[in-house]
Image: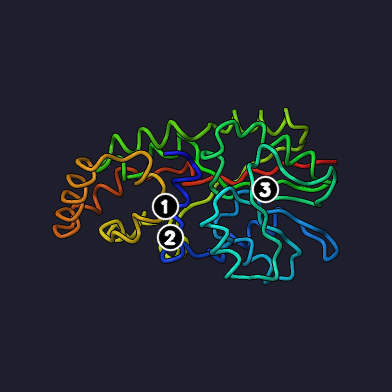
Amino acid sequence: MSNTAIYNTIGKTYDTTRKPDPEIVKILSHFLEPTSSGRYLDVACGSGNYTNALAQTGLNIEGFDISDEMLGKARLKNPAISWHQGDAKELPFQDSSFDGAICTLATHHMGRFEEAFKEIYRVMRPGKFVMLTATPEQMKNYWLCHYFPMMMEDAGQRMSSFRRVEQAYIDAGFINIKQEKFFVTNTLTDWFLHAGKYRPEMYLNPAVRAGISSFHVSANEKEITTGLAALKADIDSGKIQKIIKQYESDGGDYLFVVGEKV
């Protein structure tokens, strides 16, 4: 299944469980350092959750995504925002059109994301490019690995190390690359892959799994059925708390990466 088809499928119920998390919105804005007169771009914006949340803070931001289904949801959410469709590796904007850009949890669906980074650099004026991602090293510490080992192995292989992401920033032209770990809390409102770190019962809900791409791309039905049965049994017995503790790590659950065009 192509990335477009995947997100057209996920997009049908995506907003049921995927909401903009206030803390993530705050961090994105902090790193982006927007100005009141600036113009910003959300690359691979999906259904526009973070685009719209940042727009509500007063940011002049536009959304860009490859999926018709996702953009349909985005337009309904906020018709005042300019929404654009296409491939991030061929952005339909003139050079130096934006003062900054964001990309949240999407580079693993871009394929050659290095080309997308070059395009983002091209369409930016001096400013910040902020992304949220997860590294394979971080994903090895998700307790989901205990219940869905093959899914998590495949999902981890689809992600990129910080070194590769950093090199892609550098090759595109960005400088002053920095990273900041992000730890999931039990109040997270955007239910992506490891959002249930402290709420394991979430994964028993088919609607939650429907909004997580790994359950579509990296999973097989037999492992999901077996893993869910084991997870439910461990939740009922309380054993899940021991499993969660075994996977504790100070490496962060996700990673913000920031680069600057000067």
- Give the image location of residue 255, x and y in percent: 55, 45
**Mark 1 nearby-residue class (10 Å; few <14, some 14–19, many ≥20):** some
Q: Earlier in the sequence, mark 1 or mark 3?
A: 1
Q: Nearer the viewer, residue 9 or 151?
A: 9
Name the secondary structure under disc 3: strand
Name the secondary structure under disc 1: helix
**Mark 3 nearby-residue class (10 Å; few <14, some 14–19, many ≥20):** many
State the mark number for residue 64. Answer: none
Quarter occupied by the C terminus: top right
**Which residue is at 43% across, 60% downward?**
12
**Which residue is at 37% across, 33% downward?**
154
Q: Would you say the residues marked 1 and 3 are in contact, meaning their CB atoms lie under 8 Å apart?
A: no
Judging from the image, the colouring scheme is rainbow
State the mark number for residue 9. Answer: 1
Q: Nearer the viewer, residue 148 or 64?
A: 64
- Give the image location of residue 190, x and y in percent: 47, 61
- Give the image location of residue 83, x and y in percent: 67, 59
Q: Earlier in the sequence, mark 3 or mark 2?
A: 2
**Which residue is at 54% across, 44% downward?**
133
Q: Amino acid at mark 2?
A: Lys
Q: Would you say the residues marked 1 and 2 are in contact, meaning their CB atoms lie under 8 Å apart?
A: yes
Q: Nearer the viewer, residue 14 or 107?
A: 14
Q: Tell me the distance, in whole angstroms, between the alpha carbons under discs 1 and 3.
A: 27 Å
- Give the image location of residue 180, x and y in percent: 60, 46
Q: Amino acid at mark 3?
A: Val
Residue position marked by numbered label 2 in the rendering: 12
Task: Please tell me whether mark 3 or mark 2 is closer to you in this view.
Answer: 2
Within the image, what quadrant is residue 238 found in?
bottom left
Residue position marked by numbered label 3 in the rendering: 130
Q: Amino acid at mark 1?
A: Thr
Quarter occupied by the N terminus: top left
Q: Would you say the residues marked 3 and 2 are in contact, meaning their CB atoms lie under 8 Å apart?
A: no
